[in-house]
Amino acid sequence: MKTLLKSKLALKISLLCLIAVLSACSDSESASTKEKEVKKAEVEKEKIPEAADDVEDMINEGPGFALEKEDEEIKKQLEKYPNKLKGEEAYNLAVFLGAAEYQKVFKLYDDYNPGFNDVEGAPGSDAKPRNLVLLLDSSGSMNGKVDGGVKMDLAKQAISNFASKANKEDRVMLRVYGHKGTSKDSDKKVSCESHEVVYPLSEYDQAAFSESLNTFKPAGWTPIAGSIQQVEKDLAGQANPETETIVYIISDGVETCDGDPVEAARALHNSSLKAQVNIIGFDVDDKGQQQLKATAEAGGGEYKTVRNASELNSIFKTLMEQAWEGIKKDQWAANSGTQVNYAYVDKLEVLNELKFRVSDVVSTEAMGLNNMIGAMEQEKMITLEEAEKARAKVKEREEKIKKYNEEKFEELKKQTDEEKDRVFKLINEASQN
């Protein structure tokens, strides 16, 4: 009997132990599950995009989500992102959510005209009709990047803007070269023979011109000479003493197809078209600049070098101003410079207004970004120490964009001063004739 009782007792103890073990395992599994769920929730938090460091990229990264949003919406948006942020992470998040829409205000700089062709009686106000011939390098190297973006994208934007400024009497043509094959030796023949008119000589049509720009991409070699030689064939029968032919070549390198661009430009300039050949060297090394400059000089034109998007647009404006020169200097001289002086004062007022507008946007953005960081502090997403680091990054961003704004202003003011001096020189020449 005693033996039976002992056996029952041992069995009960064993069952209790088993229940305790199972309960502990269950608690352990529950805790593990909860831990996994927390980790999963953390993983599912949205990643924070890295803010731009280059000033031209900063200008293009807005507008942020938080612009024109209510506080409650912003708070909900912040909940999607991790806590315990570092200073740089908080700055990146603030920019992603609150970056200003700079594109619109900086476009006003791009639209600014530093010249005086729009002044009544100015040289070019009754200019001859022109054939504006654009030759665009589409070799593989145009896929490279400079400040502001990919060279080909920037070149397309610049020539599109340039063509849109043509007078209604002008006709525009776009020929590309080097847009087939690759830069490999095996593709040299195919690529060097690739130069094609994608927008035939005609009045400028925005939709058709934009469509033509989408028909090619950077590809192979650089047949500059062959492309120049084709222009005379493109414009066969177009020679006319009442029409000027002006060629603009945009290239980021030298001839690589064994041609002689200097002789090709000279022949075109001396042909019945009497074409003027201008070249814009886009991010070209010193050796390349020498060849391109010699080509432009042989073609009776000018060579300009640019390193980024801003310089490219500015040079195109200058070349267009010079093309508009053609020319009743006697009418212009009759104004005795009075109209130019009035126009100059007006242009400086416009420039100053642009600078202040941009500066106001910069200051407003900085205030908004700092407020965003303050909201992160309130939501316990960031410590005070890390918040100060984030605010330092905001200050650095503010200073960069303000400096860029000042540089844009000074650059356009310098161009305006140079254009004014050039026009007064024309006035003096006309008054002596």
Image: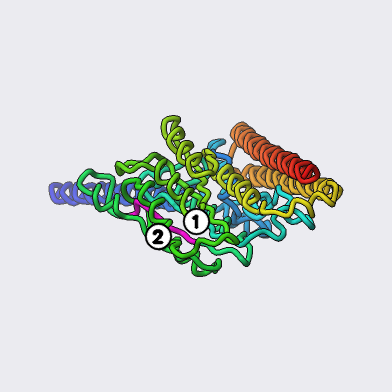
| Magenta-span inclusion, residue 178 | yes
Q: Position of residue 378 (x, y in %)?
A: 65, 45
- The front one of 144 and 392 is 144
Q: Amino acid at mark 2?
A: Lys
Point out which mark residue 273 bears: 1
The residue indicated by pointer 2 is: 233
Q: Position of residue 145 (x, y in %)?
A: 44, 42
- The front one of 81 and 370 is 370
Q: Specify whether residue 204 is in view.
A: yes
Q: Where 187 falls versus 413 (above or below)? A: below
Q: Main secondary structure of the magenta part?
A: strand
Left or right: 267, with 93 as reference point: left
Query: Which residue shows up at 59% across the image and 34% down it?
Result: 386
Query: Which residue shows up at 74% across the image and 48% down it?
Result: 354
**Which segment is the magenta one?**
173-179
Point out which mark residue 344 bears: none
Mark 1 and mark 2: Cα distance apart in space = 11 Å
Q: Secondary structure at mark 2?
A: helix
| Magenta-span inclusion, residue 206 | no
Left or right: 394, with 254 as reference point: right
Q: Secondary structure at mark 1?
A: loop
